Image (tube, rainbow, N blue to C red):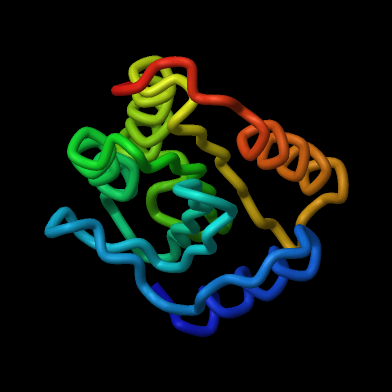
């Protein structure tokens, strides 16, 4: 991953979503780390993974599974960002990212959500609006189950 791409994407999302990323890694208790993050409220987090050179982008989703399992109070919204040149964009491992995310959404219901963001030259306003709505919906969800 290029630090320039990470900073560029973070700044674009900060401006358009009206958030402020920490600009630091979030450590997942031995399960890896996340490229950038922001605490939305209470135990709700927005995580950002930027796939520029990762050939196994599914691991960036998969590592959240044990973290969520061991941290039952945490709620995570993951934005996984790709560029047209990202090796995992159309690979089988890229498809596994979305598949794994859909499984996590089914298992963790109100505690996990996912958004795949593909950046061509810029981010389409319709895509940004969809992302804003999904994040707002996630922020407003009430936990119905206490453990998952």
Is residue 70 placed above or below 104 in the rendered structure? below
Residue at coordinates 40% horizontally, 16% vertically from top-left?
145
Residue 39 pos. (x, y %): 52, 59
Q: Is residue 132 left or right of residue 78?
A: right
- The residue positioned 40% from the left and 67% from the top of the image is 35
Q: Is residue 28 left or right of residue 79?
A: left
Total label count?
0
Q: Which quadrant is home to the N terminus? A: bottom left
Occupied quadrant, residue 146: top left
Left or right: residue 23 compared with residue 11:
left
Q: Position of residue 110 (x, y in %)?
A: 49, 25
Residue located 39% across and 54% down the image: 87
Q: Write down the quadrant of residue 131 in the picture.
A: top right
Query: In front: 92, or 116?
Result: 116
Q: Residue furthest left?
A: 30
Q: Position of residue 113 (x, y in %)?
A: 51, 33
Residue most extreme to the bottom? 4
**Depth check, front residue: 144 or 113:** 144
**Nearer to me, 34 or 141:** 141
- The image shows residue 99, relative to residue 4, as above or below, that is above
List x then y, in percent, for residue 18.
77, 64
Is residue 80 visible in the rendered structure shown here?
Answer: no
Placement of the C terminus among the 4 image quadrants: top left
Residue 115 visible to an observer of this rendering: yes
Up-down relation of residue 9 to residue 146 (above or below):
below
The residue that appears at 56% across and 41% down in the rendered structure is: 116
């Amino acid at each position: 991953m290029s630090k320039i791409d990470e900073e560029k994407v973070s700044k674009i999302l900060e401006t358009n979503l009206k958030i402020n990323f920490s600009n630091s890694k979030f450590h997942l208790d031995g399960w890896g780390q996340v490229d950038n993050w922001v605490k939305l409220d209470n135990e709700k987090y927005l995580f950002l993974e930027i796939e520029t050179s990762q050939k196994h982008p599914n691991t960036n989703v998969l590592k959240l599974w044990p973290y969520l399992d061991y941290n039952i109070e945490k709620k995570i919204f993951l934005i996984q960002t790709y560029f047209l040149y990202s090796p995992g964009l159309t690979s089988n491992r890229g498809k596994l990212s979305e598949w794994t995310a859909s499984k996590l959404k089914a298992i963790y219901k109100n505690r996990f959500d996912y958004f795949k963001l593909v950046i061509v030259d810029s981010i389409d306003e319709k895509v940004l609006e969809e992302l804003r709505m999904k994040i707002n919906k996630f922020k407003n969800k009430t936990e119905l189950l206490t453990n998952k």
